[in-house]
Image: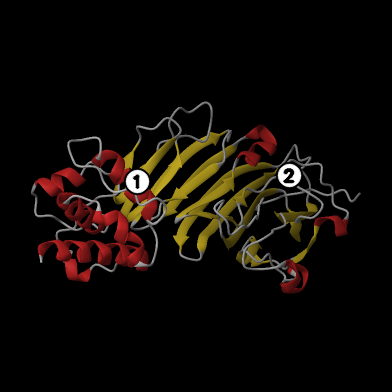
Amino acid sequence: MKPFLFISILVISISSFADTGIFYSEGGNLFPIQETSISMQKEVLHFKYTPEGLEVNVYFEFNNPGEARNEIVGFVVPDWWGGDIEHGDFDPEKELRHPYVYDFMVAQNNKILTYKVSQFSKKGFNTDIDGVKDNDYIYYFNLNFEPGVNKIYCHYTFKGSYYKGDESFLYRLKTGKMWANQTIGDFTMVIDAKKKWFEIPETLSKSVKKAPWKIEGIGKLNEKYPEYTLAYIHSGFITLHMTNLKPDYDINLGFYGLISYYRNFEHIYCDGDNSKLPDFGWFIGSELADDYKEPLEKAEDNAIQDMINFLYAIHGYNFNGNDIADYFTQFTWYIPDPQLNAKDIKFTLKEQAFLTALVKERTKRRE
């Protein structure tokens, strides 16, 4: 067994193209196995949502109070199964990357480091750590911890889990407690997710009831739920700053798709005096307009128009201050833009299929 300081960014990767969805990977914090003297005095974590996955840029400052130490450092990526990449078609050691982790880079004190990728068991590394298995893969490299402050920067993009249009990403933060003092001295998180409706943790520590999330730009926060906060960013960022953070919880970010928008709209819509919306089952999110035909035939006229309004509302269409606009303001994801013209809205393929079916049904009833 090789003795070494192990620093890991856990990235779990499991994939399946069934109703269980697709679970590609996870991101995570740096942590040691046996370290007791080096402390994490600063972490600046920046998440950016992209269609390819969650882009992570993280800056660390570690303080080494003792002598210089050269250590093997690792980024652990558990094995994957299913998905669109078969094991026989992809060799992480040859490609120097995990198939669902992209553009990995690590630097120390402004110098980009070289790294290798291997299956964990082949190197004889110690796996006595929660969540690490022999068949996991490891990005490993050398770090020289000089006395005093050491600056480390890491960048990568990873795919999270996917289920019927919703995407979720897990970043393992609580391993930060494994450093000296079991705290992150100064912690900052920035989330860049423009025009997205998503879920963020209510807190990261048992000692803090609610994390002090802030919107720097235009957006909404809905904090009425006990375990998470809903957010929508029209432009700008969501930020969080905490000091002496003892991270008891990991960071879960959940980004909602069309199905969740509709379920949220349907739930509140049916709470009032409105007629019941049709039950589409899981057809919401289909790219085929004909999939909506039969359920729409049973819907009342006003429900057809309300669903059309809903599709425009999720893009921020301004309904000129009438009752429709007042109604949609109760949704976290609705921020009207008076400069937005209906003809300029770019619907996704799934939204366009739904809209086409609705308009076709409305037109048929008017003939």
> Which residue bears the numbered disc 2?
32
Residue 155 at least partly seen:
yes
Local SS, label 1 = helix
Instruction: Check disc 2 and give the amino acid type.
Output: Pro
131 to 117, vertically: above or below: above
150 to 173, vertically: above or below: below
Instruction: Check disc 1 and give the amino acid type.
Output: Arg
Q: Residue at x 31, y 58 (%)?
A: 294
Local SS, label 2 = loop
Q: Which numbered disc flags the more N-terminal residue, 2 or 1? A: 2
- Quick one: label 1, few (<14), some, or many (20+) residues within 10 Å? few
Residue 213 at least partly seen:
no
> Which residue bears the numbered disc 1?
263
Q: Quadrant of residue 141?
A: bottom right
Marks 2 and 1, how far apart in space?
A: 43 Å
Side (left or right) of 142 relative to 232: right
Q: Residue at x 46, y 48 (%)?
A: 254
- Tell how many labels: 2
Where is residue 257 shown, x and y percent of the image? 40, 55
Where is residue 45 shown, x and y percent of the image? 52, 51
Q: Nearer the viewer, residue 2 or 335?
A: 335
Q: Nearer the viewer, mark 2 or mark 1?
A: 1
Q: Nearer the viewer, residue 124 or 293?
A: 293
